[in-house]
Amino acid sequence: MSLEHVMVVAGEASGDRHAADLVAELQRARPELRFFGMGGAALAARGVDLLYSANEISVMGLTEVLPKLRRILQVLAGLTRAAARRRPRVAILVDVPDFNLRLARRLKAQGVRVAYYVSPMVWASRPWRARAIRRTVDRMLCILPFEEPFLRRSGVDARYVGNPVLEQVPDPAPPEEFRRRLGLSPGRPTLALLPGSRLGEIQRLLPAMVETARTLALERPGLQVVVPVASTIDPAVVSAYFEGSGVSPVLVAGRAPEAVGASDVAVVASGTAVLEAGLMQRPLVVVYRVSWLTYFVGKLLVRVAHIALVNLLANRRLVPELLQGDLTPKRVLAEVRRLWEPGPARDEMLAGLAEVQRTLGPKGAAARAAQEVLSLW
């Protein structure tokens, strides 16, 4: 019976999608496997027995974690007990390293083999975590090409399997085609706003985005604003931020890459969505803000020059990053204006985004990751 059970733990919207694609590949290869753990709508759709919702630990920053810490610890203990009862041969832990590395240590103590999908960013901060990874993770499945050699230098069994986002974005098409798919007017100027998948991100980022859209609408008659809403967010929460702005956004459930594809320019919260947006080959502006305490601690720990994934992959400031105090409607609007019309700035960015896509290699990350997981049996 233990051979048939696999634990899967994902803690946010992007990780849920990556995990679901991996589970789909494992189900094709081994139909007898039974999956349980924690995740969201995508894993639920694959028939995974979800003991906890990903929303329970989907927080970002110290000030958000503290109020939920007791519940997070309860979930950690509950998953540990579930593993002891069901005795999975393999656990697939996806991202959320502060949670999953602790769970990995507990699972290893039970004799469970651990495959970790989406490596913790030890190359950016807290490099000493590589030692914990070496002790508790049997196979690290990397989705950024520079992660494998970095982790192997620390003795981690790391494999670059490709980037799952390549398969999750739609095939290239003109903006007018994506606008039709989303029910937008094909010929009207379009701004995409991607404020994130966590409530805290919505609260900190969306006000500046809305004000940017309000001013841009005065300059560009007929402007339509499209906002993809993650499954973790109530659309009514997003709509409330636009009340009184004079802007009537088109809210779409998920479909963030298509929203970017429909746009002339996108304003995107830092995270996986930035890579999705970059792969859509549209100009974008990256924004982010956390609490002052989280930012202060992050400045002490983070050792990279950029936070946007496309900038890290390009090894230069390819897209603008407006963080903390720089995230103002005036600054966002200036960048949007600079990139809107055809010209050197827009052309240089689009050429760089095409270069970033080539660095990721071919599609097929989930299938390659599944083979690595099966090799742990």
Image (cartoon, helix red, strand yellow):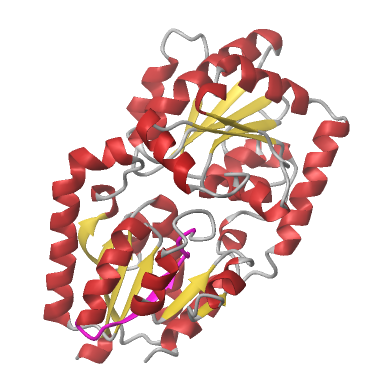
User: Is residue 98 shown to the viewer in this render?
Assistant: yes
Residue 357 vs residue 32, the one in the foreground: 357
The answer to whether residue 269 is above or below residue 324 is below
What x and y, as percent, mark residue 368?
55, 79
Q: Answer whether residue 189 is visible to the viewer in this image.
A: no
Q: Which x, y percent locates residue 33?
A: 31, 84
Q: Position of residue 9 (x, y in %)?
A: 31, 65
Q: Residue at the location (56% across, 58% down)? A: 168
120 within the magenta span: yes
Q: Quadrant of residue 293?
A: top left
| Res 36 → quadrant | bottom left
Residue at position x 46%, y 75% from top?
Answer: 140
Residue 181 point in image, percent of width and height: 60, 41
Q: Is residue 210 left or right of residue 4?
A: right
Relative side of 308 to 39, left or right: right
Instruction: Please give left or right for residue 43 compared with residue 37 in the image.
Output: right
Which of the 4 quarters of the picture holds residue 258? top right
Q: Residue at x 37, y 39 (%)?
A: 198
Asked if residue 109 lies left or right of residue 343, the reply is: left
Quarter of the image that includes the C terminus = bottom left
Based on the picture, tell me whether residue 195 belongs to the magenta stretch: no
Write down the region rendered in magenta. Answer: 110-121
Q: How many marks?
A: 0
Quarter of the picture holding the N terminus: bottom left
Q: Is residue 224 above or below residue 365?
A: above
